[in-house]
Amino acid sequence: QVQLVESGGGLVQAGGSLRLSCAASNINPMAWYRQAPGKQRELVARITSSGVTSYADSVKGRFTISRDNAKNTLYLQMNSLKPEDTAVYYCNGDRLGYSYWGQGTQVSVSS
């Protein structure tokens, strides 16, 4: 059974930091997305199987994606958070042509 379980969200003041985790079972998690109220889900960061990372322009220099292969866990370190980073953050991975999502974790940044 494929599982992606996110954790680490919460309420933080602008300028603060949070670290999101995505524990995966039977799938390799590869990306973080987010969805703000009334907006489409957007890609935040991605990491390839060889460790190459890419980021949305809005988070470059502030967010860092990483993966612990031994634990099969994906991370997103978020620094210098802004109110516009407020969203539900989702972990994503593909397996056998299908895309899987976690349940999401809420990140709220107050000004």
Image (cartoon, grey):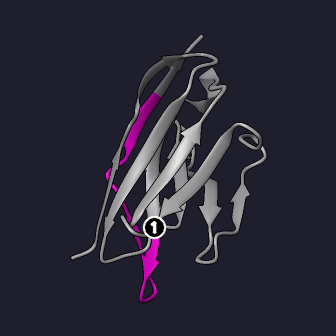
98 relative to 55 in the view: left or right: left
Whether residue 19 is visible here, answered yes or no, is yes
Q: Residues within 10 Å of mark 1 (few under 14, many from 20)?
A: many
Q: Is residue 98 magenta?
A: yes
Q: Which residue is mark 1?
A: 29
Which of the pair 2/63 is nearer the observer?
A: 63
Image quadrant containing the C terminus: top right
For mark 1, give the secondary structure: loop
Residue drawn at x 53%, y 37% is 36
Whole-percent x, y for residue 32 in the image: 53, 54
Which of the pair 34/17 is nearer the observer?
A: 17
Whole-percent x, y for residue 70 in the image: 39, 69
Q: Amino acid at mark 1?
A: Pro
Q: Is residue 108 magenta?
A: no
Report the span colored magenta: 93-107
Residue 102: image quadrant is: bottom left
Whether residue 43 is visible here, answered yes or no, is no
Residue drawn at x 61%, y 65% is 47
Q: Main secondary structure of the magenta part?
A: strand
Looking at this view, name the residue that lies furthest to the front: 70
User: Is residue 111 positioned above or below 97 on the image?
Assistant: above
